[in-house]
Image: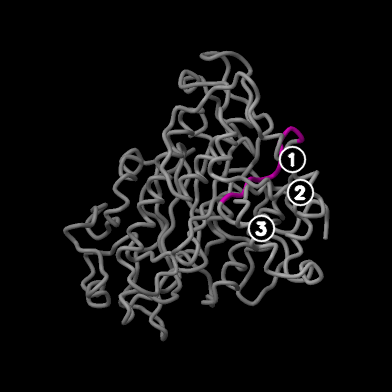
Amino acid sequence: MKRREFLAAAAAMTAAGAASWLPGAAYAQGSMAVQRRASGYDNLLILIELKGGNDGLNTVVPFADPLYYRYRANIGVRRDDAIQLDERTALHPALAPLMPMWRDHELAIVQGVSYAQPNLSHFRSIEIWDTASNADQYLREGWLTRAFANAPVPKGFAADGLVLGSAEMGPLANGASAVALVNPAQFARASRLVTPVSLKERNPALAHILDVENEIVHAADQLRPRPGQYVLKTGFPGGAFGTSVKTAMQALASGETMAGSQGGPAPVPGQGVAVIRLTLNGFDTHQNQPQRHADLLRQFAAGMVAMRSALVEMGRWDRTLIVTYAEFGRRVRENQSRGTDHGTASAHFVAGGRVAGGLHGEAPQLARLDGNGNLPVAVDFRQIYATVLANWWGLDAQAVLQHRFDTLPLLRA
C-alpha cells in the first residue's frame, strides 16, 4: 500500500474534542465585499454522502402526478404539506430551511441521477459512485484520488481532503492524502473487529493508519487553529451530522490565512484542503420511513443552512460547491413495512454562491418504470463529476473519468 493512501486519518476526536479546533480564520464579515473569484483548487468542493440510499421521490415530490399517490398511498408526502417549487414539483416539508437558498437561485436540484445497469447492492453501488466506474468495471482508486494524481493540490495545502462522519475514504480511497476525523470510540471498535494478523487483509487502510500514527498526527496539526484567529459566529445544529458540519467549518477556517486585517485583502488559501467529504447516515429506510426520513432531511437542511452561514462569514460561499450523492435511490412502490426498498434514479442537491439554481435533469417518469419497478435514468452521475472537474476546477474531466461525459449547466459564469 502506498504511503499516500492514507496520509492522515484517525486524528481521533470526540464532539467535546472538536472544540479544540476553535477558533476560525482571521477574517470576518467585512471581507465579503472584497472577496476574489478564485479558480482551480481555490474552489472548494464539499461532498455530502446520504448513506444508505436516499428516497428521491419523497425528497423532491412529483405531487402533480396521480401515480405518485397510487404507488405511495401510505408514505407519500401529502400535497398540502409539501413545499411547492413549480406546478408539478415540491420539496419535503422538512427541507423548508433550504427555501431561502432556492429563492436566491443558489440551490440546484438534479433529478433522475443514476447510471446504466444500476446495481442494488449497497457495497457495490457505492463503489461504483466512489470510483466513477461503469457497472461492470472495477477500478481501485477513487475518482478524486485520480483527479489529484492528474493535478496535485498546491504544496501549501495541508492535504487533498478532509473526511468526517465515516471511516471510509470513498472517492479519496487508494492514493489521495486526507485527514479523517474519527470518533475514537468508533475507531477503537473498528480496530477490535479483527485480529492483528487479519487486520491488514480485512482493513488494510486501518492497519496503515496504525503504522503511521506519528505522520497522521503531524498532518492533522497543520489544520489546527493558530493564536489570534477569528472565532466563527455561526451557530451549528446538534447531533452527529451537525457536529461534523461544525468541525468541518472550523477546520476550514483554521486552514486559511489573511493577507491583511479585517476589511483589507480577501482571504487567500493557506494550509487548506480542496475537498471535504461529510456523511449523513441512516437513509436505508426499509421500514417506517415517514418519520425516519423526515428526521434525516431535517438534519440535512439544518447542516446546509449552517454551512452556508459559516461559508458566507468566511467569505467562501462563492468559492464553494456543495454536492450530495448516495449509492442509489429507492423503489417507486412502497413496501408492506411502510418503507421503500433499494431503487435506482434519485434527486441530488448542488448548492453554492455561483450555482445556477433551479430544477435540472428530468422529472420522474412514473409511467415508464422498468420491469423491476424502477425509474429510468435521465442523468449519469458522472455528468455531475465532470461538471465539478471541468467547470469548477478546470481539470481534464475525460482523463480522470476515463470517458467523456457531458457537463451540466449547474454553474453561473
The amino acid type of the residue labelled 1 equals Ala
Location of mark 3 (residue): 188
Q: Residue at x 61, y 68 (%)?
A: 128
Residue placed furthest toward the bottom: 371
Q: Magenta span has 162?
A: yes
Which amino acid type corresponds to the residue marked 2 in the rendered image? Leu
Neighbours of disc 2 within 10 Å: few (<14), some (14-19), many (20+): many
Q: Position of residue 181 (x, y in %)?
A: 63, 47
Determine contact: label 2, label 1, CB under 8 Å. yes
Q: Is residue 245 magenta?
A: no
Residue 73 image position (x, y, % from top left): 22, 75
Q: Is residue 62 above or below residue 260?
A: below
Query: Within 10 angstroms of label 3, few (less than 14), some, or many (20 or more) residues?
Result: few
Q: Is residue 67 left or right of residue 124?
A: left
Q: Nearer the viewer, residue 413 or 105?
A: 105
Q: Secondary structure at mark 3?
A: helix
Asked if residue 83 lies left or right of residue 382, the reply is left
Nearer to us: label 2 or label 3? 3
Dot 2 corresponds to which residue? Answer: 7
**Magenta part of the protein: which range?**
155-164
Q: CA distance from mark 3 to mark 1?
A: 20 Å
In the figure, is residue 175 to the left or right of 180? right
